[in-house]
Image (cartoon, rainbow, N blue to C red):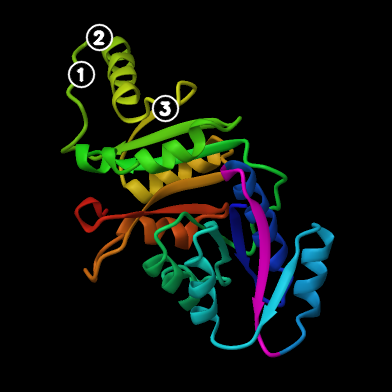
Amino acid sequence: MPLVIAAIDNSAAARPVLAGAAALGQLLGAGVEAVHVADEPGQTARACADSLAIPMRRLAGDPVTEVLVLASASSVVGVAIGARRRVKGHGIGHLPRAVLDAVDKPVLVVPPEAPPVERFRTALVAMEGTPAKARAIKSAVELAAGADLELIVVHVDDESSIPSFSDQLAHEADAYATEFLARYAPGAPRARLELRVGSPAEEIIAASTSLAADVIALGWPQSPEPGRGRVAREVLDRSHVPVLLVALASDAAA
């Protein structure tokens, strides 16, 4: 049976991670198992898992090592993990970053303030303006295409990449959106495109708020380049809803 692993700590922040894992499991057609890596019994973690009827394993050892071993199993199709309570610009924590860099399966990063949801109803798939980065959203779109949810592709251009529309702006923008979705989201006929111009991370966060998205999906570049994933890192640092990261090759890095 396909499985989503929910890595949780022994705090109340475990509950939104478990709820996010359950929602991701519905999306992927998978069950959910919680894992708590620590020496202490983990009573809070156990109580959170029990309240959602999710089985939990407690393991001893190094959290990064144990979670990566579990995630490598062929039956595991996704991982949900909590972001530590963040100060802007200080990142999401060591464990989530290690998992993102090593796991080539979808990873859901859940902020501690995220409201628990029973399922994802509105998914925002975010991308920047270049054709290479447009192709990079394919995996995220495919995850959502067969699910009963509203899929919104937010395409953020800056002044250098925005399409040159004529005085028939509305008509040409609609035609551009139709062509874009036909090319890059053919497996999601219910998808719609929202065009925005400006700072990618700012526009993605603003769109997630105005569109009441339950989850943001975007690419995570697994490469050794020190500046990789600038947009993804800023979204992770600022988002108040879960962020689903899909591993990208280095040539599609944002």
Residue placed at 24% from the left, 66% from the top? 227
Region of the chain picked out in magenta, as a range: 28-39
Which of these two is toward me, 123 or 78?
Answer: 78
Residue 35 located within the stretch drawn in magenta: yes
Q: Which of the 4 image quarters holds residue 98?
A: bottom left
Q: Amino acid at mark 1?
A: Phe
Dot in front, 3 or 1 = 3
C-alpha gap between disc 3 and disc 2 = 29 Å
* N-term-proximal mark, 3 vs 1: 1
Residue at image location 47% in from the left, 43% down from the top: 206
Which tag is nearer the camera, tag 3 or tag 2?
Answer: 3
Q: Residue at x 54, y 86 (%)?
A: 62
Q: Is residue 90 visible?
A: no
Callout 3 touching callout 1 (CB < 8 Å): no
> In the rendered image, which residue does mark 3 sit on?
187
Q: Secondary structure at mark 1?
A: loop
Which residue was labeled with disc 1? 165
- Callout 2 amino acid: Gln
**Which is nearer the eye, 201 or 116?**
116
Numbered circle sitting on residue 168: 2
At label 3, which amino acid type do we have? Answer: Gly
Q: Secondary structure at mark 3?
A: loop
Is 213 inside the magenta-drawn segment? Answer: no
Q: Which of the numbered marks, if any, corresponds to residue 250?
A: none
State the image coordinates of residue 216 (x, y, percent, origin top left).
49, 46
Where residue 39 appears, as percent x and y from the top left, is 68, 90
